[in-house]
């Protein structure tokens, strides 16, 4: 795992966005895995800026989102479909046909989930998967004790996640859908690179458990220790529980220029 600690969220967003931009420039037909929630918003804003000011071209890029609430139509302002249009897709030149977001209203969920997996394979797999992390260590909506080999499927959210996400539903936990479709941990692990963003003290424990704890399904993100290309972009607050924080900073500051992401 590569740990990139920035003094603030803005710097993390810029560095992470540069990494994605480099991928797109190297291969205009890149396949990106997208996340929702508050963590990637700043990075998406930076990608939008690069599109508008530096002609970063998304016209041949394909995307697959991690997850979606079950039972929310696309038009619901808290659906992840709606989120992605608002926060990114409406502002860049991506082809709508290349965008894939799980359909929380699909009639036959098991068949739909299998089809989603097949589409990722047909597209050639994911080059860079963007991830946030839940305060309970979830990635996608793979909650603690999710199988580390799981594929796209329906999951039930934990009470903790319902509480965390109630901030998007007028603070009313009962309005947060209990079920979601999510890529599995096995699916996420097949991405050629995973790029995790986490900010603020609320993520400090989950980040420390992920990076320095044992690999366990109790902290789903800890499986990223097994990934060859997992990069973790965090601010000082999210890094505050890391035992080897100074070491990670020292490693990054000593990286040769040609190896740096940004
Ligand atoms: C969202 C997703 C979730 C979030 C996580 C953190 O697509 O997959 O794992 O990344 O719940 O959410 P925020 O960023 O809102 O703290």
Image (cartoon, grey):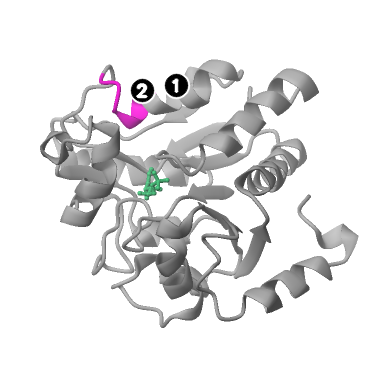
User: Who's the residue at 27% across and 31% down the image?
Assistant: 103
Question: Within the image, what quadrant is residue 7 found in?
Answer: bottom right
Q: Which residue is mark 2?
A: 82
Q: Which residue is mark 1?
A: 85
Q: Position of residue 82 (x, y in %)?
A: 36, 23
Quote the CA–CA distance across marks 1 and 2. 5 Å
In the picture, the disc for residue 167 is none
Q: Is residue 216 above or below residue 191?
A: below
Q: Position of residue 143 (x, y in %)?
A: 26, 60
User: Who's the residue at 65% across and 61% down the image?
Assistant: 5
Q: Position of residue 134 (x, y in %)?
A: 36, 55
User: Which residue range is magenta in the image?
Assistant: 76-82
Circle 2: element type? helix
Residue 125 seen in the current view: no
Q: Nearer the viewer, residue 75 or 226?
A: 75
Residue neighbourhood size for the residue with mark 1, other residues' Cα within 10 Å, grouped as few (<14), some (14–19), many (≥20): few
Question: Within the image, what quadrant is residue 58 found in?
Answer: top right
Could you tell me if the residues under marks 1 and 2 are in contact, i.e. CB atoms within 8 Å? yes
Q: Is residue 25 above or below residue 78?
A: below
């Amino acid at each position: 795992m590569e740990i990139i600690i920035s003094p603030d969220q803005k710097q993390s967003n810029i560095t992470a966005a540069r990494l994605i931009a480099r991928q797109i420039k190297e291969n205009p037909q890149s396949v990106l895995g997208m996340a929702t929630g508050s963590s990637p918003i700043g990075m998406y804003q930076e990608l939008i800026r690069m599109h508008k000011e530096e002609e970063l071209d998304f016209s041949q890029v394909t995307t697959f989102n991690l997850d979606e609430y079950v039972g929310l139509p696309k038009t619901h302002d808290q659906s992840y479909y709606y989120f992605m249009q608002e926060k990114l897709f409406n502002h860049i030149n991506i082809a709508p046909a290349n965008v894939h977001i799980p359909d929380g209203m699909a009639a036959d969920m098991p068949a739909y989930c299998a089809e989603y997996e097949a589409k990722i394979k047909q597209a050639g797999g994911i080059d860079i998967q963007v991830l946030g992390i839940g305060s309970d260590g979830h990635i996608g909506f793979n909650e603690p004790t999710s199988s580390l080999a799981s594929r796209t499927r329906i999951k039930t959210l934990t009470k903790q996640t319902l509480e965390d996400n109630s901030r998007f539903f007028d603070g009313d936990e009962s309005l947060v859908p209990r079920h979601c479709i999510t890529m599995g941990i096995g699916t996420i692990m097949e991405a050629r690179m995973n790029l995790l963003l986490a900010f603020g003290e609320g993520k400090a424990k989950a980040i420390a458990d992920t990076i320095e704890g044992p690999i366990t399904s109790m902290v789903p993100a800890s499986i990223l220790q097994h990934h060859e290309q997992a990069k973790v972009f965090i601010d000082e607050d999210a890094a505050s529980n890391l035992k080897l924080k100074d070491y990670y900073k020292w490693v990054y500051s000593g990286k040769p220029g040609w190896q740096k992401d940004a």
